Structures are given as structure tokens and as C-alpha cells.
Amino acid sequence: MKTRAVGEFEWEVPIGEVPGMRVPGRVFADQELIAKARDDRALEQVANVATLPGIVRASYAMPDIHWGYGFPVGGVAATDVDAGGVVSPGGVGFDICCGVRLLRSDLTLDDIRPHLNDLARRLGERIPRGVGTKGMLRLDRTDLAGVMREGAAWVLGSGLGWESDLERCEDHGRLSGADTAAVSDRAQQRGASQCGSLGAGNHFLEIQVVTEIFDETAAKAFELFDSGVCVMLHTGSRGLGHQVCTDELRAFDKLMRRLKITVPDRQLACGPLDAPECERYFAAMAAAANFARANRHALAHGVRETFADVIGRTAEDMGMRLVYDVAHNLAKIERYVVDGRERNLCVHRKGATRAFGPGHPELAERYRPVGQPVIVPGSMGTSSYVLVGTEAGRDKAFWSTCHGAGRAMSRTQAKKRMGGHQVKSDLEDAGVLVNATHPALLAEEAPYAYKDVDRVVDTCEGARLSQKVARLRPLAVIKG
Amino acid sequence: MPYRILDHTADVGIEATAPDVPGLFSEAVAAAAAVILDASPGPATGAMPVAVEADDLGALLAALLGEALWTFESSGRLPVSAELEVSNETAAGTFGVVDDVTIGGPAMKAVTYHQLAVERTPEGWRARVFFDV
């Protein structure tokens, strides 16, 4: 796949690299990251996405890009709602509204050190995790309907969490337009038992400490300080979201045949935004997104309770407030000026995070002066980051930035390099406690299987997609 | 080898071969089980009914594998083979299943349509499927 440099941190995949490209590909990467992107089929996927009907400006890829299914992971594509634009369920993915939530605290590293072993053990006991695990909440169908409609607010209404959590959450914890009738029985069956569970794979919960502040003003707004203890959790909509995408992929595959739309990869199945199938998809996607928000909200409650039990102070007293909750697999209708005209665009972010710049009206008042917090998890043993959206980000890539380090190595390669027990022991030698239900699986998620997260966030900053606010180091990792 | 595991940066794929379509689908079920177990699955110790519909053989195989994942998630019994009657639009019969499974591989979330293929070859049939893990 041909690429040409169009800036220090920007590369173009020219129209024509794949038949039917309507716009060029635009990859944000430095020399090393673009070389990695060429190693797998990610750039071909960037070009494939550029064939989607109604796509505007470019098929974008964030610096953590890698080969996905249909869309590359790290892909961003916006289609014009009023000019034949499409939505593609594969452009959101199976884990709808997978995302990251960060809790901060007034605790310092010295405060927590004596409790760290207990916290890692107790969080491991308290937080349901692993494949198909039953969640903390037991929901009947009426409760589940409430979760799908109201998201985090439903869990708050049931007595868990804090009122202030909602304004510190993308979409205030609730994506509008959810319709439970659009969610199949099987999806609901899978969801009813899994709300308040972490899952497996790359999902995790980490106790972290802030090791560096890059932007004092934003850090103050986000209530982060050097040596401050935080808790990060990464999970999504569990089986409910997986099933919604599975159901919709089948429906869109049929729709495309009926409308004679062709795409280079069947996983890019899509349909025009005015088709009834698309209306139903948005209603089901919003329901799954709300489930994901409720899931992370419930888990955060479990974290606060565990800290309170172990440390012997209330979560309020420890200042365990939410910094933010971001999604990195979602499609949304947003307004942007393209070619001199303001338009409604359907912005797909698949493994990419929305990053509104300062002054955006959708941001809570406390964050509006500085911009939206962006939570970027590293890989076990490496740093995670808090970033902030920039003014320039709007025109760069529809206010989007990276979502993590991005995989660099397949699971098979990672396992060949080292066994899971060795990975655990190396992490513990480096001062990171590990509580995993399947230590053998740790090898698949080993730090060396990922790109260098420092390089990824520096590239985002160089490309003016986002700016660094704080770096966090893991102290304890809880994995499914 | 009737199936092999395909490398992918983030996810995992399988390629299966067989002389006929029912055999191909059974090999694909075994391959998915091999990914979940991170080992070749043993013989089935039980059976569970399965029936799926789709517009073509590729979508049919994806639907069948989706049922296999659902069977595992909902019952804890892992499909390791299938005895099926397959037409272009339906597959019906039984999964051969095993109990008391130890998961040794990645959590398999869903069956994708990425590079999905069921195709005739000079020797018989070949299928390729990627899973979201």
C-alpha cells in the first residue's frame, strides 16, 4: 500500500490504492509507527474504509492503528447524513461503547503502599471478571430495559454511585435514542446477567499513580496531581453489545445486497442513514452503549466500596471522584463544517477516542475551559495517560485521538516469546502486582505485544490531535 | 491438517478444509474450539441440537459458529464438532459437545465477516473465518 508523507506526523494513502476509494486515507504516525502500520493489513483497511458511500474528507487512522476486522483498529470515518452517507455496524465493532473510566483520589502513593496487596486481592474478589461471568447487578427484563434507556443514570437511581459521576461522563452517561425493542431477545438474555462485570481479554482494572504532570491547568481541572492514586477500568457492553453487532451485521449484509451496495470487505456492511435498518441500528447501538456506561458505573461503585473497606475511610473522604468515562467504539451524529458548509456527520470511531477541544458546548462546565479529558490505557506494566482535546483536533480528524498503545504482535507471537507466568513474575519484579484469573493468558497481553504508548501519545500531540496532561504508572493489575 | 489457526494482530482466524460442506463446517467448529482451548479438542461426549439459516454458505458458517459460541456461553458445553445437513441456506443437526472445559486461549467475543470465505477447491472445500477476541 502506497503512502506519502504530508506532514511530520501525517501520511496519505492516495485515492486509487483500492478500487472505489472516494477520499484518501490519512494516517497520523511518526516514521516508526507508519513502518509498524505497514507490517500488517491495517493500511489496506484504511483504504477499504475510504470506499464507504458518503465518506467525507478522509479515512483517518490514529497512531495506535493496527489490523482489525473491516475497519482498522484506530480508524475514524465520517459520512454525510444528508448526502447518501452510511452507517457501518462494523465501524463500531462488536464491543459497542467499549471504553475507559478513570477515578482519581486524594490518596498518595505513600498512603496506599501498605494496603496495596490487600486492595489487589480484595478487588480481585469483588470485581466479577472472566469469560461470560455473571455481573454485580442482577437485572430482570424491566431493570435491563431501564439500563438500556438510561445508562449510568439507571444504576445511580438504584443507589450506586454519585450524582457528580454523570457530568464527568461522555454523553453524561446516557446516549439518547435507545430503543429496547431494537435489541434482540438473545442480546437481552446475554446482558441481563453480565452488568457489572469486567470480561476478559484486554479488559482490566488497574490501581495507578500519577508520575508526571505535563499540563498544570488541565490537570487541576481534572483534579490530578503528582503522586496521586487513581483507578482505571477498561471494559464495554459485554455479551449484549456483541450480540447487537452480530444481529445487525447480518441485517446490513442483506440490506447491502438489496440496495446493491458493494464494499471491499463484507465486515464493512453498511446502509444509508435514512434506511429503517439504520434507524434500528442506532436505537440498538445506543441501548448497548448505555449498557456499557451502566456497566462501568457499577464497577466503579465496587471499586469505591473495596477501597473504603480496605483503607477504612469513606470513598467521599478519599475524594474518589470520576475524572471521565470515554468510549472508543461508537458512531455518533456530530456537526462539522466540511467544504464551507455545516453538516450532520455520522462519525465512526473504531478504537479511537472522541477528544473535544476547549469551549465545546457538550462538555460539562468544569471541563469546558480546558477541553475533554481523554483516557488512554497503556499495556500492563507500561504507562497510561490522560490527554486533553485540542482546538486543532476538530479539523484534523473530527475531534478524535488514540485509544491505547495499539497491538504490535499477534497473540500467538506474544505467547511464543514468553509464558504467562514469566510475564507475571517480570511485572512483579518491576513493582506491579498482578491478580489474574488465568495467568497463562497474561502472555497474550504482555507489554511487548503492544506499541510504545509514549510514542503513540507523543505522535498525537505532534499531530495536534490531543495534548498530554498526565502520565500514570500501574501499581496493581486485575485481569479476567 | 483439516484446520489451522491464522495469525492476526489483534484477533484470530481459522482456515478449515474438507471434502464436503458438512465436513467443512464440522472442521470449522473444531477449529473454533481449538482456539478457545488453545489445544486440539478431544472427542465429543454429548450432543446438542442446532439449526441456522442464512443467504449463502459464508453467512451460514458464520451463523453456525455464532451458535457454537452462544452454546458455550449459555450452557458451558463447548461444541467441538457438528453433524449437519447443509443446503445453501440452512444447516441443521447436532453439535458434538464436551463438558468441564478449561479455557486456555483468548476470550472469543464474536464471529466477524472479515475476509469470510467458503469456497470450492480442486480437493473439496475451504473456509476462512476471523473471530473478534
Image: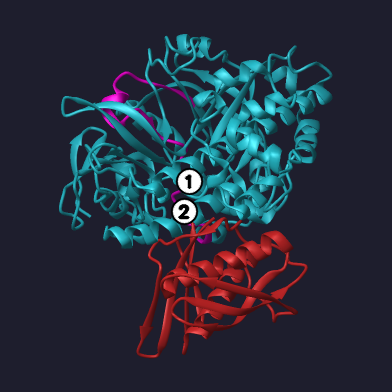
Chain colours: A cyan, B red
Q: Indicate left or right for B67 with A327 as reference.
A: right
Q: Indicate left or right for A475 with A8 as reference.
A: right
Q: In which quarter of the image is residue A452?
A: top left
Secondary structure found at label 1 = loop
Within 10 angstroms of label 2, few (less than 14), some, or many (20 or more) residues?
Answer: many
| Tag nearer the camera, 2 or 1 | 2
The residue that appears at 59% across and 75% down in the rendered structure is: B30
Residue A447 locus on image (x, y percent): 54, 44
Q: What stretch is highlighted in magenta?
A: A386-412
Q: Verify whether residue A445 appears in magenta.
A: no
Residue under pointer 2: A248
Nearest to the observer: residue A429 or residue A256: A256
Above or below: residue A110 compared with residue A71: above
The reply to whether callout 2 and callout 1 are in contact (CB within 8 Å) is: no
Total count of labels: 2
The residue that appears at 27% across and 43% down in the rendered structure is: A85
Q: Is residue B10 visible?
A: no
Q: Which amino acid does label 1 sit on?
A: Tyr
**Do badges 2 and 1 share one subunit?**
yes
Above or below: residue A228 compared with residue A273: above
Q: Verify whether residue A409 appears in magenta.
A: yes
Q: What residue type is labelled 2?
A: Glu
Secondary structure found at label 2 = helix
Quarter of the picture containing the N terminus of chain A is bottom left
The residue that appears at 75% across and 29% down in the rendered structure is: A116
Residue A103 locus on image (x, y percent): 63, 23
The subunit carrying tag 2 is: A
Residue under pointer 1: A450
Nearest to the observer: residue A427 or residue A239: A239
Q: Indicate left or right for A455 with B78 as reference.
A: left
Q: Can residue A366 be seen in this view?
A: yes
